């Protein structure tokens, strides 16, 4: 089976799309599939990381901004069109060249800047198309659509008018794309006491606005100094030196850059202060309670739903919270062991770590 992924990472896009596609690609490779990637050379891309994982990457050059044809008065322009680094037609043509003359078995697209128009342009180059999405804000012409987010009972309706009637939709954390280490760590880890002694901080793989520093400052308060802290930042984080300087003001505080997996640090932690992206499913699988900060507009809706259902402690969008908000929430979590225990149990019930196997069953099965 020949499979091509079209996805990107950048300082604006973040790293989550690439990381979840890598998890799926590695699992498909174990099943005998030949996987490759098509990625644009954005600032903050992860092309070299993909190659280090043993996959071929076809690079797409950045298109000069002045030549990108986007009419802002056009109501069909996607809200994340600027993330593409090219116009839709140019990206489609470049992707065709990258794929070559062979008709691939599956094209897997994980990109907020692509929709049914791009997918239709590529139609003669693949047998089946899978879309990975979180937003439900545009139409798709696909055979299979994955959205691993949770919206309660509303989730079944999100894509009803956005995909063909023949498209199979696989929705919710049952299909969360977690690395194989999470299932193993979950089976091996001891029960959580939910007494908070160690805090894990991760505000996304790119964090261009340095929300990490805001959180570390919140933890650098005399009332919280007894907490051990692990701070994780991405390989392209722009403010490593300043974060290290802040961490040096605390005892038992370590800064980790570019770790391949958060799993072991999650097992060691009692509370996580996290961005609102796909890391949340990894954390829930391991029963780690969290204070969640939305670092992108598209993270707010699902985390608001999770908060209302009691799964997480959600502070809101990063632009609307301050250091004292974070500090107060940490103190509230320290005092409410019962709530932390409930979030541990609820998280592990929602995310069982079998999502990749469930997705592969759909890709390799005969019902799509």
Image (cartoon, rainbow, N blue to C red):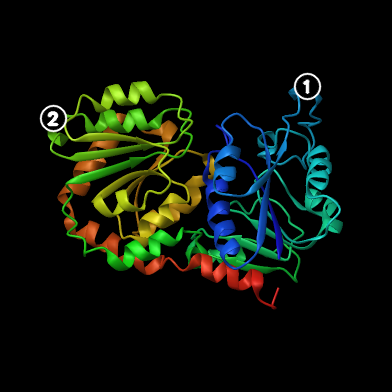
Element under disc 2: helix
Quickly name the residue at label 1: 66
In x, y percent, where is residue 110? 64, 50
Q: Name the quarter where the N terminus is drawn.
A: bottom right
Q: Residues within 10 Å of mark 1 (few under 14, many from 20)?
A: few
Q: Name the quarter where the C terminus is drawn.
A: bottom right
Residue at 13 percent of width and 38 percent of height: 226
Quickly name the residue at label 2: 222
Front residue of 280/96: it is 96
Q: Is residue 253 left or right of residue 141?
A: left
Front residue of 186/80: it is 186
In x, y percent, where is residue 116? 77, 53
In x, y percent, where is residue 173? 48, 63
Residue at 56 percent of width and 31 percent of height: 44
Front residue of 14/126: it is 126
Whether residue 156 is visible to the viewer of this picture, yes or no, is no
Earlier-in-chain disc, 1 versus 2: 1
The label number, if any, that marks residue 261 in the structure image: none
Residue at 55 percent of width and 58 percent of height: 26
- Marks 1 and 2 close (CB-CB < 8 Å): no
Q: Is residue 127 left or right of residue 130?
A: right
Q: Is residue 218 above or below residue 283?
A: above
Q: Is residue 346 above or below residue 278?
A: below
* Inter-mark Cα distance, 1 to 2: 51 Å
């Amino acid at each position: 089976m020949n499979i091509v992924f079209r996805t990107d990472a950048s300082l604006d896009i973040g790293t989550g799309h690439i990381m979840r596609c890598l998890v799926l690609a590695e699992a498909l490779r174990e099943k005998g599939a030949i996987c490759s990637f098509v990625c644009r050379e954005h600032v903050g891309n992860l092309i070299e990381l993909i190659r280090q994982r043993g996959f071929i990457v076809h690079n797409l050059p950045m298109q000069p901004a002045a030549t990108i044809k986007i009419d802002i008065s056009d109501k069909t322009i996607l809200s994340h069109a600027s993330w593409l680094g090219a116009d839709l037609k140019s990206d489609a043509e470049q992707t065709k060249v990258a794929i070559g003359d062979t008709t691939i078995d599956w094209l897997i697209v994980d990109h907020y800047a692509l929709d049914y128009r791009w997918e239709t342009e590529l139609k003669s180059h693949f047998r089946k198309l899978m879309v990975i999405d979180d937003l439900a804000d545009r139409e798709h012409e696909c055979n299979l659509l994955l959205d691993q987010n949770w919206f309660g009972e509303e989730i079944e309706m999100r894509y009803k008018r956005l995909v063909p009637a023949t498209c199979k939709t696989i929705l919710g954390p049952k299909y969360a794309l977690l690395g194989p280490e999470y299932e193993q760590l979950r089976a091996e880890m001891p029960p959580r006491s939910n007494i908070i002694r160690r805090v894990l901080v991760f505000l996304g793989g790119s964090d261009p606005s340095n929300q990490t520093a805001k959180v570390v400052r919140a933890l650098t308060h005399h009332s919280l100094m007894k907490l051990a802290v692990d701070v994780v930042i991405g390989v392209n984080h722009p403010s490593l030196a300043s974060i290290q300087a802040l961490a040096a003001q605390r005892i038992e505080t370590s800064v980790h850059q570019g770790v391949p997996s958060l799993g072991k640090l999650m097992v060691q932690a009692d509370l996580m202060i996290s961005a609102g992206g796909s890391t949340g499913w990894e954390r829930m699988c391991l029963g780690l309670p969290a204070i969640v900060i939305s670092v992108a507009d598209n993270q707010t809706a699902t985390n608001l739903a999770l908060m209302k259902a009691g799964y997480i402690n959600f502070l809101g969008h990063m632009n609307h919270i301050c250091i004292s908000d974070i500090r107060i929430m940490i103190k509230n979590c320290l005092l409410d062991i019962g709530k932390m225990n409930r979030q541990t149990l609820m998280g592990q019930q929602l995310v069982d770590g079998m999502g990749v196997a469930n997705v592969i069953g759909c890709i390799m099965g005969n019902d799509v």
